[in-house]
Amino acid sequence: MSNTSTMLTLFPSRIYRAQLDHPELLAEILAASAVLSIDDRAGITWCEKNGYPGYTSYASLDDLPWRFPAFKALAKAIDAHVKSFAKTLQFDLGGGKLQMDSLWVNVLPEGGFHAAHIHPNSVISGTFYAAVPKGASAIRFEDPRHAMMMAAPPRAKKATLENQSFVSIAPDPGTLLLWESFLRHDVPMNRSEEERISVSFNYNWV
């Protein structure tokens, strides 16, 4: 009688992290974000109407890489990382490719937050961090199986990272994070007096 056992790890949720150390590009993105948060009247109006804290170009401008060379350069850099991430995920694209179809700026002031959400109708989503002041919130990811764990007990306080129900990742200026778009995430309240500035985006299969 054998007493051996094995453990399989199935259906992992992967987060891709890279550091884009391009000080000039970072400075240009910060400058462009400042201009947008003042001049994008449609975006400002949308934020006020929908109770969005701070500013986002999400609902107003879908052509930032065309308007600003800095965003065009950023999108090109992100493309290479998305290609690498897709290879790790072993996607079979069937002759197609993953293509960025949206990119927007987020300026989160003190007290601002992003409620938990997913990115529907996308394959890979992500965020590039331009300004992360001391005290600014980390991004928090949620175990996507929560809805199906009806009677599961809570996780131990010292549970390993892969067994936790929520995992927070603190970025630095220049950090790029990628994840599969179904992964639910949120940004708790920004407790810094300075603005937390990021650029988010989605990729679709075309």
Image: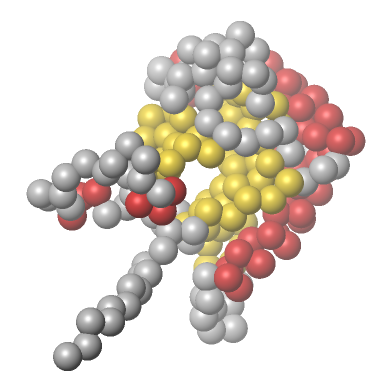
Q: Is residue 167 above or below residue 83?
A: above
Residue 97 lies, in percent from the top left, at 60, 72
Q: Is residue 62 above or below residue 10?
A: above
Q: Is residue 147 above or below residue 26?
A: below
User: Residue furthest toward the top?
Assistant: 193
Residue 148 lies, in percent from the top left, at 18, 55
The structure residue drawn at horizontal position 73% and vertical position 21%, both measured from the top left corner, is 34
- Name the quadrant containing residue 57: top right
Depth check: give the residue in front, 35 or 25: 25
- Name the quadrant containing residue 174: top right
User: In the visual, does 167 lie left or right of 41?
Assistant: left
Residue 144 lies, in percent from the top left, at 32, 52
User: In the visual, does 65 lie left or right of 25?
Assistant: left
Which quadrant would the C terminus be assigned to in this image? bottom right
Colour scheme in the image? secondary structure
Q: Is residue 10 above or below residue 132?
A: below
The structure residue drawn at horizontal position 27% and vertical position 54%, both measured from the top left corner, is 145
User: Residue furthest toward the bottom?
Assistant: 1
Which quadrant would the N terminus be assigned to in this image? bottom left
The structure residue drawn at horizontal position 73% and vertical position 46%, both measured from the top left corner, is 19
Residue 71 lies, in percent from the top left, at 75, 42
Q: Is residue 149 visible?
A: yes
